[in-house]
Image: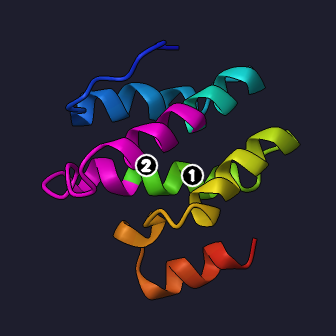
Amino acid sequence: MATSLPANPTPQTVMGLTSKIKDPDPDFRFMALSDLLTLFTTSKIDFLSHDFNMSRRTADHVVEALDDQNGEVQNQAIKWYGDGLPISFTLSPDELEQANRY
């Protein structure tokens, strides 16, 4: 996992972190969610607005992490909601409702 995140993240930065969310090791999944959370709170919120596929994949991975077998990973995914981050930036109203059922 990267110890420092770039000041100007790119979709490639996000792709590297989202791939870690599927790692078998729960520590990697936790740290990937933590790094993504930091990335989205410190960067411009619209830096993925031109890359629909990457923003959608990020939202899908975070929603899937809500159902992770590890409780700490689940709690880290919940922080996306608790911190007021716009996880809904790529979700339709029906998908957002489904995510809220978790």
Residue at 43%, 49% in the rendered image: 58
Q: Is residue 101 magenta?
A: no
Mark 2 and mark 1: Cα distance apart in space: 6 Å
Q: Which region of the structure is painted magenta?
A: 34-56
Left or right, residue 49 beside residue 82? left
Q: Indicate the amino acid at tag 2.
A: Thr
Label 2 close to label 1 by CB (< 8 Å): yes
> Which mark, by number, is residue 7?
none
Q: Indicate the amino acid at tag 1.
A: Val
Extreme-left residue of the structure: 50
Q: Is residue 35 magenta?
A: yes
Return the x and y of residue 68 as percentages of the image width and height: 77, 46
Q: Which residue is mark 2?
A: 58
Coloration of the structure image = rainbow
Left or right, residue 76 beside residue 83? right
User: Which quadrant does the C terminus fall into?
Assistant: bottom right
| Residue 69: quadrant of the picture | top right
Mark 1 Cα shell of 10 Å, populated few (<14), some (14-19), many (≥20): many
Residue at 73%, 22% in the rendered image: 27
Task: Give the prevailing secondary structure in the magenta stretch.
Answer: helix
> Which mark, by number, is residue 62?
1
Return the x and y of residue 35 as percentages of the image width and height: 51, 31
Left or right, residue 101 beside residue 81? right
Residue at 35%, 35% in the rendered image: 14
In the image, residue 24 sits, relative to residue 86, either above or below, namely: above
